[in-house]
Image: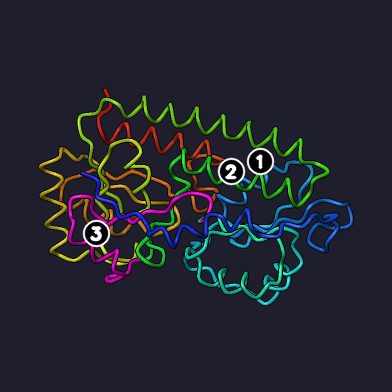
Amino acid sequence: MNVRRLIPAAALAGAVALGATALTSCSGAGAAGGEDGKLGVTASFYPLQFVAEQIGKEHVKVDGLTKPGVEPHDLEITPKQTAQLGEADVVLYLKNLQPAVDKAVAQSGVKNIVDAATLTELEAHGASDHDHAAEEAHAEGEGHDHSQGEGGTDPHVWLDPVKYAEIVKGVGAALEKADPGHAADYKKNTDELVGKLAALDTEFKDGLKNTASRTFITTHSAFGYLAERYGLDQEGISGVDPESEPSPARMKDLQAVAKKDNVTTVFFETLASDKTAKTLATDTGLKTDVLDPLEGITDTSQGADYFEVMRSNLKNLQKALGAK
């Protein structure tokens, strides 16, 4: 069963912030946009960069703060990037995912700042859907692990195509306001991207409808929204950084879960070490495979963009869960 704690209404007041932000119209010829009159957009990491590129197309110049291959949670910002950030026409970020970015954005003085966390509802997900005590501890902020944002909410909303589509709509609206001259194009591209995400959602729904197991084990507890959307149970290797060894007690728990829930596979990700997954797999006689949290695209990613990697994730989940 998926336990979740919704954020209190007060926190959701932020959701109206986008509407209230004075998204002033500007020529888009700021330094970040270059001399070609393009709207200069700075995105904190890949999922937001992808949205800006897909919606803005030829009208925007998008810079990403997190370079390919860098674990976004660990990002440190250079003085040069801080200066660049201040010159952007629009800044897109997800508050509480990258503390260094939050600080730089607060100091940037940019008028058009969009916090993706206000565009959809964030929830708390424990490392284990079966472990309610861990869920409570996470929500209280104890045993902080790097897959959780502040206040115990899980920032990995882009892994749920439905929630990602809500972010897409908000970013589209922000670009329309920031660059009204191209609003019709932004609207058309937004609708197109939302349509593609709806199709992806259907593929996941259909592809995971009928499986031998509903439980998957992963080194990075990033898949809570995805698990919840498609009725799966995520078992994360709890309260640890993806780089560190799991505790013997957790290993024992996971071995029991694997046995009880017909788990065949331990998933690791492309941007972090696979040591933990391999240790667990060896001890439990399970296979390993990749489940990509899509925090960045590199040469080792199983696909060239968000949609390709999500489809690889779906294929790997179907295989691991024994889709019929």
Magenta stretch: dominant SS? loop
**Which residue is identified by label 3?**
135
Q: Which one is earlier in the sequence, the residue at label 2 or at label 1? A: 1
For the C terminus, which image quadrant? top left
Query: Which residue appears farthest toward the right when viewing the image?
Result: 35
Figure quadrant of the N terminus: top left
Tell me if residue 130 comes above or below residue 81 in the rendering.
Answer: above
Q: CA distance from mark 1 to mark 3?
A: 36 Å
Q: Which residue is mark 2?
A: 168
Model colouring: rainbow
Helix, strand or loop status at disc 3:
helix
Dot 1, crowdedness within 10 Å: few (<14), some or many (≥20)? some
Residue at x 43%, y 49% (from the top left corner):
293
**Residue type pointed to by label 1:** Gln
Residue 286 vs residue 235, the one in the foreground: 235
Q: Residue furthest top?
A: 324
SS label for mark 2: helix
Please give the residue where the numbered disc 1 appears in the rendered image: 54
Image vertical order of residue 172 relative to residue 117, above or below: above
Let me know if residue 230 is in the magenta part. Answer: no
| Residue 19: percent from left, percent from top | 63, 53
Magenta-drawn segment: 118-145
